[in-house]
Image: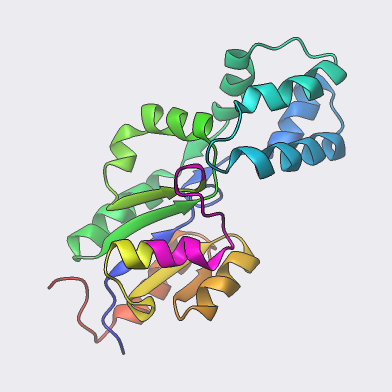
Amino acid sequence: MAMIKAVIFDLNGVFLESELLSKRVKEKYGVPEEEFVHALKTVMDVVRKPDAPKAFDLWKPHLEKWGLNLSEQNFFNFWFSGEKLVPSLVKYVDELKEKGLKVFVLSNNFRERTESYRRQFSDFFSKFDGSYFSWETGLVKPDPEAYRKILHDNELKPEECIYFDDSDQNIEVARSLGIHAEKYEGLEATRTTIEKLTSGSLIGRK
């Protein structure tokens, strides 16, 4: 078994959990969920890349169509305030670090959301050896280069890494590169997977 040196995590749907934004918007503002999801996908396809326009500028036509007179601050406060860290998983990162493993975040995300996270959860992000956001790197999962960049930047081989995501497509791409990749299904399943892959092998420490 190869020596495991690093664990890579997706962010949303793993460390951050929330009720579906489309459901929250429907409950508070009456916007049909399918309409909101379509708008969300359209906007996210643009803003998760570098040099994108301000996210709110892309949202404004949709909000106006729905008759919602929301400021940028009010809209994003409503969105981001519904996202909470999972304390038990955050604590588990400390355990992984104590074992000598490097820990990374790999996320498709946009500037305003990332900046909000870094302000609100600064202690959390300080735990990681690196946080890779698509709007900064220009690499959007499931592009294989998004994974290769972490490997290259940190002198890691695919077989030295474990990756967790809530997207089947992202997992399949990671596996195609030789990375140990599993669907995220909660802390205990994650712990079991990592312990199984590191059991009997040297881990982390050089």
Q: At 27% from the left edge and 47% from the top edge, which residue is drawn? A: 127
Q: Main secondary structure of the magenta part?
A: helix
In the rendering, at what x and y percent does residue 23 appear? 75, 35
Q: At 33% from the left edge and 40% from the top edge, which residue is drawn? A: 124
Q: At 72% from the left edge and 25% from the top edge, which residue is drawn? A: 59
Does residue 49 appear in the picture of this structure? Answer: yes
Q: Residue furthest front?
A: 51
Q: Is residue 34 magenta?
A: no
Q: Is residue 36 left or right of residue 149?
A: right
Picture quadrant where residue 26 is located: top right
Q: At 72% from the left edge and 30% from the top edge, which residue is drawn? A: 24
Instruction: Check the image and report above or below for 176 versus 22.
Output: below
Q: Is residue 49 left or right of residue 197?
A: right
Q: Is residue 137 magenta?
A: yes
Foreground pick, 7 / 134: 134
Residue span colored magenta: 135-149
In the rendering, at what x and y percent does residue 162 appear? 40, 71
Q: In what quadrant of the picture does the C terminus appear?
A: bottom left
